[in-house]
Amino acid sequence: MTTEVNGAQAKYTAVSAVFVMIKLKGDVGAMAVGGHLNKKKDVSCALNPKDDIQQQHISNIGKLVENIETEIRSDVHGIVLSKPKGIINSSRFMAGLEKSDARNAHQAELLAMLKAKADAAGNQ
């Protein structure tokens, strides 16, 4: 966190980094998903010279920290949690399609066999 004061204006810069590692172990196997996120945010705030300057700094910095924390939580949720969930769900969907294709092929084979038997019985 850095602070620059120029007259009745203060500029605050916050830099934050988050590292996330999720490890899962189940019946099928183990999986580890990890990532990091860096965020920098600059905010300029007006200072009232009639009020306590230190209190204003504390208030402004507190708001900046809360804002950057909210943004990081949202970004981490979107990148680290939602994206892998989408990938896993799409692979499950593809596996379901493969099973559906195999089932359709089996049904077509059975229909062809029944038709061939019906044709053979009709020709006798």
Image (spheres, rainbow, N blue to C red):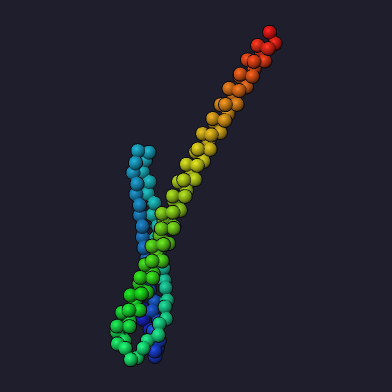
**Residue that appears at 39% across and 90% down:** 7
* Outermost residue toward the right in this view: 123
- Quadrant assignment, res 8: bottom left
Image quadrant where one finds the C terminus: top right
**Residue that appears at 62% across and 22% down:** 112
Give the answer, above or below, for where 48 lies relative to 24.
Answer: below
Front residue of this view, candidates 65 and 24: 65
Image quadrant where one finds the N terminus: bottom left
Image coords of residue 84 (percent x, y): 44, 51
Image coords of residue 99 (percent x, y): 51, 34
- Quadrant assignment, res 52: bottom left
- Quadrant assignment, res 61: bottom left
Give the answer, above or below, for where 52 lies relative to 87.
Answer: below
Question: In this rendering, would 85 be left or right of 102?
Answer: left
Front residue of this view, candidates 27 and 120: 120
Front residue of this view, candidates 84 and 31: 84
Image coords of residue 107 (percent x, y): 57, 26
* Outermost residue toward the top in this view: 124
Image coords of residue 89 (percent x, y): 46, 45
How many labels, in total?
0
Give the answer, above or below, for where 104 lies relative to 115.
Answer: below
Front residue of this view, candidates 4 and 119: 119
**Residue that appears at 35% across and 70% down:** 66
**Residue that appears at 35% across and 79% down:** 60
